[in-house]
Amino acid sequence: RAGRGDDGDMLTPSRCRAARALLHWTRERLAQESGLDAGRVTTFELEREPLDATALAALTGALEAAGVRFAGTSDDDIVLHERREFG
């Protein structure tokens, strides 16, 4: 399910930045939580290089595990549920 198809709730660079901001996470923290290299997170968020389905699933999974939920198609359709920790 993570990474998504064309159903409107796919993780995009702007949605990734918005979700990370909700969590008050740095790119390095997201990289650590997802198991990806920080450089890959940076190039994705800056729209320099797309990620493959496996990497998208890792990012989405880390954000969702922290309580982020994606819905709809805009950056405004990102919510934080049951946040377990700060920073």
Image: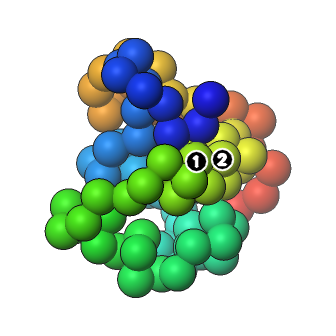
Q: What element carries label 1?
A: helix
State the CA–CA distance, disc 2 to disc 1: 6 Å
- Left or right of 62: which side holds 45? left
What is the crowding at mark 2: few (fewer than 14 residues within 10 Å), some, or many (at least 20)? some
Can the viewer see residue 47?
A: yes
* Residue 45: x %, y % from top left: 30, 62
**Foreground of the two, 39 or 29:** 39
Which label number is shown at residue 61? 2
- Residue 74 placed where, x, y %? 28, 26
Q: Please give the name of the residue rendered at 30% of the width and 52% of the height, measured from the top-left corner.
A: 13
User: Which residue position holds label 1?
Assistant: 57
Q: What residue type is labelled 2?
A: Gly
Q: In which quarter of the image is the C terminus?
A: bottom right
The mark lying in front, picked from 2 and 1, is: 1
Work out whether 68 lies above or below 32: above
Residue 85 spot, x, y in % from top left = 77, 58
In this orientation, which residue lies closer to the viewer: 38 or 19?
Answer: 38
In terms of depth relative to the viewer, which is nearer, 62 or 79?
A: 62
Q: Which amino acid does label 1 sit on?
A: Ala
Image quarter where the N terminus lies is: top right
Residue at position x 49%, y 74% from top? Answer: 26
Q: Quadrant for residue 43, please give it.
A: bottom left
Please state the horizontal and vertical placement of residue 61, each as a whole percent of the image.
66, 47
